[in-house]
Amino acid sequence: YDALEMAGFIPDSTPSTQRDRVGIFYGMTSDDYREINSGQDIDTYFIPGGDRAFTPGRVNYYFKFSGPSVSVDTACSSSLAAIHMACNSIWRNDCDAPITGGVNILTNPDNHAGLDRGHFLSRTG
């Protein structure tokens, strides 16, 4: 919300900002928070609140956008792949204003330790 507000984005103010022409493209890889929350009560919002595939749709729903809603998981390149898909969506005339970015939350140290042991992390930062 803050990013859209700070960018001066006003839905329906121009032909390219019509809500049906706005798409959401998110790069998302880790969802270890689901494992931590798995011991909690499972209710109506367990899947849409915790499954990566639902995140872009929740943003679309909140802002009443109805363009493409895409979750991309290509590990380390997820955000870049989401940007690539957003650009392609413009070129194919699927949407005029793609909102794209990346989301990753590592809340469990086991995943970080596994990445380290697999030599996926840089020793120099």
Image: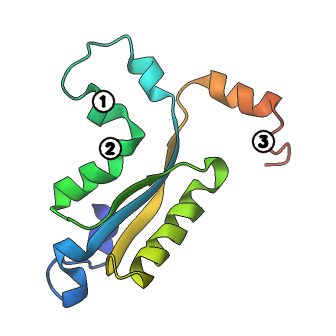
Q: Is residue 118 left or right of residue 66?
A: right
Q: Is residue 117 above or below residue 2?
A: above
List the single residue furthest toward the bottom: 15
Residue behind mark 3: 121
The circle drawn on residue 47 is 1
Q: Which amino acid lies under the numbered mark 3 shown in the image of this protein? A: Leu
Kindly check if marks 1 and 2 are in contact, taking CB atoms under 8 A apart as contact.
yes
The residue shown at (81%, 32%) is 118
Q: Is residue 25 above or below residue 12?
A: above
| The one of 94 and 79 positioned closer to us in this rendering | 94
**Which quadrant of the rendered structure holds the N terminus?**
bottom left
Q: Which amino acid lies under the numbered mark 1 shown in the image of this protein? A: Ile
Is disc 2 placed on a helix, strand or loop?
helix
Neighbor class of circle 2 (other Cα within 10 Å; few <14, some 14-19, many 20+) is some
Observer-side mark, 3 or 2, equals: 2
The residue shown at (19%, 72%) is 20
Q: Which amino acid lies under the numbered mark 2 shown in the image of this protein? A: Phe
Is disc 3 placed on a helix, strand or loop?
loop
* Residue 53, horizontal then vertical, whole percent: 38, 43
* Residue 113, horizontal then vertical, whole percent: 72, 26
Q: What is the total number of numbered labels drawn onto the structure image?
A: 3
| Mark toward the start of the polypeptide (1 vs 3) | 1
List the single residue furthest toward the front: 92
Residue behind mark 2: 54
Q: Is residue 54 left or right of residue 63?
A: right
